[in-house]
Image: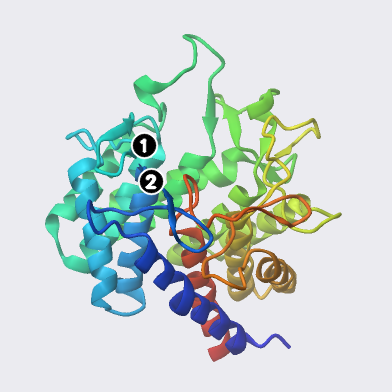
Amino acid sequence: MTDFSKLALQYKSELLDKVVPFWLEKSQDKEFGGYFTCLNRDGSVFDTDKFIWLQGREVWMFATLYNKVEKRPEWLECAIQGAEFLKKHGHDGNLNWYFSLDREGNPLVEPYNIFSYTFAVIAFGQLSIATGNQEYADIAKKTFDIVLSKVDNPKGKWNKAAAGARSLKSFALPMILCNVALEIEPLLSPDFLEKTIETCIHEVMDVFYRPELGLIVEHLGTDGELVDCFEGRQLNPGHAIEAMWFIMDLGKRLGRQDLIERAVDIALKEVNYGWDKTYGGIFYFMDRLGHPCQQLEWDQKLWWVHIETLITMIKGYQLTGNRECLAWFEKVHDYVWSHFTDADYPEWYGYLNRQGEVLLPLKGGKWKGCFHVPRGLFQCWKVLEELAAK
């Protein structure tokens, strides 16, 4: 028998005793505001540039902890100082969010990346719930409107494609919008929320999920058809699996068990497909026709892929009782806790080679911030606690 209460304590303790204090103490820039995310194994700073989407994620994380775990003033202060830095420096004055800034807040990279916007939405949305601050709510709502207006061309004038070139649409945006819509639900009208959610579910489950493959593809032609090129053949099992817990959350919210069952079915297909049968762990990128991937890091084992799989599998088990989900949760749990955790310092490694050895000792960088590890620990702790109570 799985000991859910023991597991719940393991995830809770890792979150509250190690991971959250690490970011609270090591990442805050007390001089200029915002957060350092480029942190060595011991939490020392190795680069001071600030990446907007990681700043937004950290604001969201601390606001969420304040809203959902405990009203600790230091968590709220951490979120507010990050949000104030973002409000002042993160955009061009019209809520077009830059990709990165230097330490002082001067822009380095133009607002080409839609995820700078989506994470600003959830950051200010969650913080408006924590503070009741209307200005934060307005920033979240207006930014969300901009995101929706960019769905057909997320990079806007920063799109590098040649005129008339093959045009593809990406799975990442509808996937993230499934999560964003629920995050800022209190700020949206019920009709608007319902329409947005239905569009997202349709894109994820009926467009990017391909029944002939039993898998979700990362890019499609704008006509919704498969394309035989590097991007068109690309699979990202972690992305697809993560999206399935977003869909499960929506299924729960809408009272649609059929949607939850479909999400579980797809998640299980993805993890079976993406698991490295030789060394264990889940591949980062794959090619649906089995050709070589263009990404040289295709066979690396990444922290977020495995953490998102833990969330999906334990939610899948909770919501459907499917024992295969529980078996996968336990298998991935064993891999994660024996490979990504660091015996000597808090927070987790992000990048392993195919064999499961640490590639980079960093705890944060340009792509890894205060997000997947704490969010995953929080989600798993809460589900495991509910399972233990049953």
Q: Secondary structure at mark 2?
A: helix
Residue pictured at 53% horizontal, 62% vertical: 248
Residue extending farthest to the left is 134
Q: Relative to 324, is 386 above or below?
A: below
Instruction: Let me know if residue 194 appears in the view.
Output: no
Residue extending farthest to the top is 163
Q: Amino acid at mark 1?
A: Phe
Q: Secondary structure at mark 1?
A: loop
Residue pictured at 33% horizontal, 66% vertical: 62
Which residue in the structure is indicated by mark 1? 99
Please rate how many residues cluster around mark 2, counting C-alpha atoms within 10 Å: few if below 14, some from 14 to 19, many from 20.
Answer: many
Please rate how many residues cluster around mark 1, counting C-alpha atoms within 10 Å: few if below 14, some from 14 to 19, many from 20.
Answer: many
> Of label 1 and label 2, which has the lower sequence position?
2
Q: Quadrant of the C terminus?
A: bottom right
Residue pictured at 30% horizontal, 65% vertical: 63
Mark 1 touches mark 2? (CB < 8 Å): yes
Q: Position of residue 64 (x, y in %)?
A: 34, 67
Q: Which of the 4 image quarters holds residue 105?
A: top left
Locate residue 251 relative to residue 209 in the image: left or right: left
Q: Position of residue 106 (x, y in %)?
A: 25, 36
Q: Position of residue 277 (x, y in %)?
A: 84, 55
Give me the disc on residue 53.
2
Give me the disc on residue 309.
none
Colour basis: rainbow
Q: Amino acid at mark 2?
A: Trp
- Please tell me which residue lies in front, 360 or 278: 360
